[in-house]
Amino acid sequence: MNKILAKKKLSENVFMMQIESPLIASERLPGQFIILSLSDDYAERIPLTIADADPVKGSITIIFQAVGKTTKNLAKLDAGDKIANLVGPLGSPTHIEKFGTVVCIGGGIGVAPMHPIAQGMKKAGNKVVIIIGARSKDLVIMEDEMRKIADELIICTDDGSYGRKTLVTEPLKELCERSPKPDLAVAIGPPIMMKFCAAATKPYNVPTVVSLNTIMVDGTGMCGGCRVTVGKETKFVCVDGPEFDGHLVDFDNMMKRLNSYKKQEKLHDEKDCHLNQQIETARKN
């Protein structure tokens, strides 16, 4: 059991939690993740990147969006509640060294896992340019934390309610056209965003790392649920990743696999909605 130490709502359906986990806090490195489940039965296991850690306090920080059954149930928990199972740190950590200029692109909830990577890159002596993308101003997260790290911060919103009204790929292309161009780009966010970030940097031969969040079950490479094609080879995100060369990832195949259980997820949501309606009606009566 892992105790929730603090909880905060960052934006619509996006929550931050500090969780007591001293061993993971002392061992985790940028880019690594945990897998949690909320009960001891055959509950769903979901991967979440470690957004921050405090080894002294013995806590890790996760940031998640309540979009599926497990994340919605997780969002209902508060400080003092406990999470039944939490495993980590998992995955290969980010390769961090002094590259020169590193562009960190975070889209939506992807800003959270980008945070420790940007921290690590800055600490290694790099010039760090951060691009944050969101649909609207109220969905921009961790701006203050990123400003503390960034030598240059660019914010983009789809609707123009904050920062530049554009996609993250536009300022990314502009940075690639500078002289000198960036030495490395790191992109984390929705698969379609990472796909087009990699496409934007490829003509300029800017090495690009992406962090993939695929369907995952055991986190040890045994189930094969998280497999992706990278450079025409099969890789497992949980052990070979989660970070890969964005210019080699078969994003189209990955996105098809991510949609494999959309029908079942929709049916589950409909059943939960119907059950909640029944409970609310019973309460009123």
Image (tube, rainbow, N blue to C red):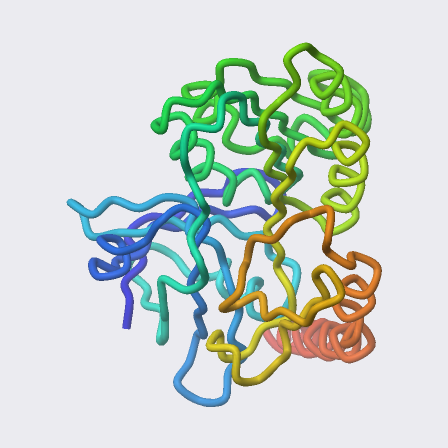
Looking at the rendering, which quadrant does residue 265 occupy? bottom right
Looking at the rendering, which quadrant does residue 256 occupy? bottom right
Where does the image place residue 36, in percent across and percent down from the top left? Answer: 44, 70
Residue closest to the eye, 162 or 198: 198
**With respect to residue 210, does 218 lie above or below?**
below
Question: Most extreme residue toward the left, as rendered?
Answer: 56
Where does the image place residue 128, in percent across and percent down from the top left? Answer: 50, 22
* Point 63% across, 72% down: residue: 226
Where does the image place residue 195, in percent across and percent down from the top left? Answer: 77, 46
Question: Most extreme residue toward the bottom, as rendered?
Answer: 41
Residue closest to the eye, 264 or 128: 128
Q: Quadrant of the C terminus?
A: bottom right
Q: Is residue 264 rendered to the left or right of residue 179?
A: right
Residue closest to the eye, 75 or 28: 28
Looking at the rendering, which quadrant does residue 137 occupy? top right
* Point 63% across, 26% down: residue: 131
* Point 73% across, 60% down: residue: 231
**With respect to residue 134, does 55 lie above or below?**
below
**With respect to residue 10, does 255 lie above or below?**
below
Question: Most extreme residue toward the top, as rendered?
Answer: 179
Where does the image place residue 281, in percent across and percent down from the top left? Answer: 68, 74
* Point 50% across, 31% down: residue: 142
Residue 245 appears in the rendering: yes
Residue closest to the eye, 241 or 25: 241
Q: Is residue 262 rendered to the left or right of residue 141?
A: right
Q: Is residue 92 rendered to the left or right of residue 179?
A: left
Figure label count: 0
Residue 284 appears in the rendering: no
Q: Quadrant of the N terminus?
A: bottom left
Q: Is residue 205 rendered to the left or right of residue 64?
A: right
